[in-house]
Image: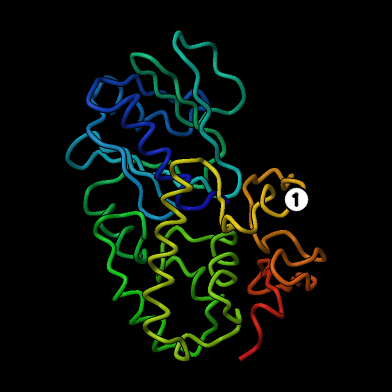
Amino acid sequence: MPEGHTLHRLARLHQRRFGKAPVEVSSPQGRFAASAGLLDGRVLTRAEAHGKHLFHRYGPDLVVHVHLGLYGTFTETPVPAEEPRGLVRMRLVGATHVADLRGPTACELLTDEEVASVRARLGQDPLRRDADPDRAWDRISRSRTSLAAQLMDQKIIAGVGNVYRAELLFRHRLDPMLPGRALDRELWDDMWTDLTALMRDGVRKGRIDTVRPEHEPKATGRAPRVDRHGGEVYVYRRAGQPCLVCDTEVRRADLAGRNLYWCPTCQPAA
């Protein structure tokens, strides 16, 4: 599932390519046809993201909410628009580009009140200016639940997925199973600052890089990582391989149905 940086990157792209101008909106697949008919020809006033959710605002009570889920994708091509291929849930045609949305978990037209309800269920998004790390800290510091589980809880921190979770814990040498209530406040502040910087870098690059300069391929002489997710990382999807810092074998375990990766030496049990 795409992590938060991907949705913020899409929001910026859509704002640049389709924002502040009338947009042709259609649903070749048909499942979004009624809503598309209400939007066709309107001006896309703003595209924004909160966590893993994308919002296209066309005016009061006219907001398209998209959640890509596991299989959703946007593909974009220059105009003129070719005939849609596959099951295109929503098509946007602007002055210069065409965007086709396929396979999302959600693509729905909401009122402003409904959007507020969606956002009220989400936690603090490090990529938003209105994020409040103190509110996330209040939730984390009062819980016996592991840091690994809380970092993936979208009601606490919106936008963090499996990659940022694993890498943030490694970079701060934290046992993934450490209870939130055992975390030091100063360390949490450092983690939030680091997470924000990593995710902003992800927005700029379109991929997740978490490895510090001294551990990059050029510095160590190792081959660059080859993985469909791209990016240089410390532990994510590196189970059975040597840690880039201490050579200990990276471990993997299941936590709430998701793979958890960590180095038992660099992240010793508390």
Q: Residue at x 45, y 8 (%)?
A: 80
**Which x, y percent locates residue 76?**
49, 24
- Decide if residue 69 is on the left or right side of residue 189: right
What amino acid type is highlighted by mark number 1?
Answer: Gly
Q: Residue at x 42, y 80 (%)?
A: 187
**Which x, y percent locates residue 120?**
29, 64
Crowd tier of the residue under label 1, counting other residues whose Cα lies within 10 Å: few below 14, some 14–19, many 20 or above: few
Q: Using the image as rendered, state which of residue 265 and residue 180 is in the foreground.
A: 265
Q: Residue at x 67, y 52 (%)?
A: 219
Q: Which residue is mark 1?
A: 221
Instruction: Label 1, secondary structure: give it.
Output: loop
Q: Using the image as rendered, state which of residue 45 and residue 162 is in the foreground.
A: 162
Q: Quadrant of residue 9?
A: top left
Q: Quadrant of residue 97?
A: top left
- Decide if residue 151 is on the left or right side of residue 16: right
**Which x, y percent locates residue 55?**
34, 43
In the rendered view, would you say 268 is above or below 235?
below
Quadrant in which the C terminus appears: bottom right
- Decide if residue 101 is on the left or right side of residue 197: right
- Decide if residue 238 is on the left or right side of residue 64: right
* Residue at the right extreme of this rendering: 240
Q: Residue at x 47, y 12 (%)?
A: 81
Q: Which color mode does the image show?
A: rainbow
Q: Using the image as rendered, state which of residue 216 and residue 269 is in the foreground.
A: 216
**Which x, y percent locates residue 153?**
48, 70
